[in-house]
Amino acid sequence: MKLLLLLALGLVVVVTATNRRYRIHAVNDFTQDDEDEALNDNELVISRSTFVLDDAKKLKIEPEAEKLSGQALVDYVNRRQDLWTAHVNPKFQNFDDEVKWGMLGVNHVKNSVKAKKHLSKTRLLDVQIPTHFDSREQWAQCKGIGNIRDQSSCGSCWAFGAVEAMSDRICIASNGKIQVSLSAVDLLSCCKSCGFGCNGGDPMAAWKYWVHDGIVTGSNYTTHEGCKPYPFPPCEHHSTKTHYKPCQHDLFPTPKCEKKCQNSYGDKTYAEDKYYGRVAFAIADDVEAIQKELMTNGPLEIAFEVYEDFLNYAGGIYIHQGGKLGGGHAVKLVGWGEEGGVPYWVVANSWNTDWGEDGFFRIIRGKDECGIESGVVGGLPELNRTRRQRLELDDD
Ligand SMILES: *[C@@H]1O[C@H](CO)[C@@H](O)[C@H](O)[C@H]1NC(C)=O
Ligand SMILES: *[C@@H]1O[C@H](CO)[C@@H](O)[C@H](O)[C@H]1NC(C)=O
């Protein structure tokens, strides 16, 4: 509980620091009246028809916009720009902050200095980078790349982004011969070095755990297949759809680490069911380095800061406009493209297919939006299981 409290405080400190920075800017540049005017005018500040990335890089978040919430924030976002659309789900308005933000489970969205010492070498490749790239099309034999999962009421995004990209990379490296869905709950509950389970974790540590300890197969709550399927049901995450119940108010506790498969899984023992990574690495915080690694080896895990406006995303190319900082979130990067001169990344979220663009979202590419280009991690699978199984016996 003490750790949790410290984490919560950590977030508070970040939020306060951010507010303060902008408040100083506000005091210097505007009077209170100017600010109100700036918020209330109907000017389209960021428009598809006149979009220039270098100009977008210079735009600052209006200090008053950081304080907006709910419908006022949604109206502001939709008035100010036409790259993406915001909507509000009234059901989530009465959720308290702890719950609203609890599903965000990453404490540091940027790669550490230490992680940057092990960078993927694909950044040095001399390859042509296409304008559009989509892993789902590039490796069409790997159907799993397009799957959207659901983390439910648990801050396990860090585990989902990891096992999703690992499963894709196993399929890609094996030319479609090995199609597995690695278990989010195995990683979530058994990786002690990863952090705090449903209360958040570290993407880089997840990839290292894959190399050292391996991860078994699983599936979702509904399908219930594989060694360790996810124990929590799908739910609506800030979506206005009603297929599922809204995600419950309290986060689920982190499940206990069970080193065995569910009874109905007859095929293999827990140890036999593990898939291992050969290497884990960070990707340089550079658009081309990220693109080269993605085109060479497949989807990656990325992390970014989530502000309240992101929760209201209902399609388009996200560019941060306002609302307060809630926390860090990890997701899976699958591609990139350009729409009317606006460059974007294509990303798979783990809030089921009712959220965003059928479970995916697009976000502006090239301005490290909310830190999305500076916390990219990945790794390569170890396809020769014989070697690993022998190592495990040696350990015993
Ligand atoms: C569970 O997984 C299966 C197989 O990937 C998929 O067809 C199904 O839509 C998923 N269910 C939910 C609720 O996500
Ligand atoms: C797998 O590893 C074993 C032991 O190191 C080796 O003998 C075998 O040739 C390897 N197989 C492949 C396909 O690389």
Image (tube, rainbow, N blue to C red):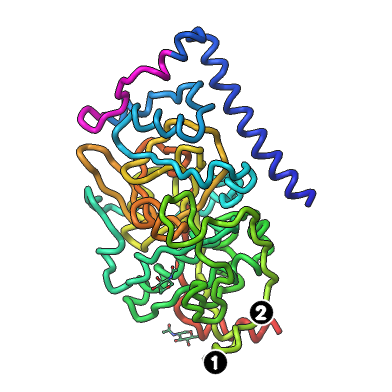
Residue at x 43% of width, y 23% of height: 60
SS at mark 1 in the image:
loop
Q: Tell me if the residue at label 2 has its CB under 8 Å from ligand 1.
A: no
Residue 30, placed above or below residue 312: above
Q: Residue at x 50, y 38 (%)?
A: 308
In the rendered structure, which amino acid carries the disc numbered 2? Lys
The percent coordinates of residue 147 (x first, y second) are 38, 66
103 left or right of 135 in image: right
47 magenta-colored: yes
Please, which residue is most extreme toward the bottom here?
A: 266
Expressed as whole percent of the image width and height from the top left, the position of residue 187 reads 59, 68
Q: Nearer the viewer, residue 295 or 161?
A: 161
What segment carries the magenta color?
Answer: 37-51
Left of 210 or right of it: where is 296? left
| Residue 186 in view here | yes
Identify the mark at residue 135; answer none if there is no mark.
none
Going by the numbered disc 1, the residue's amino acid type is Gly
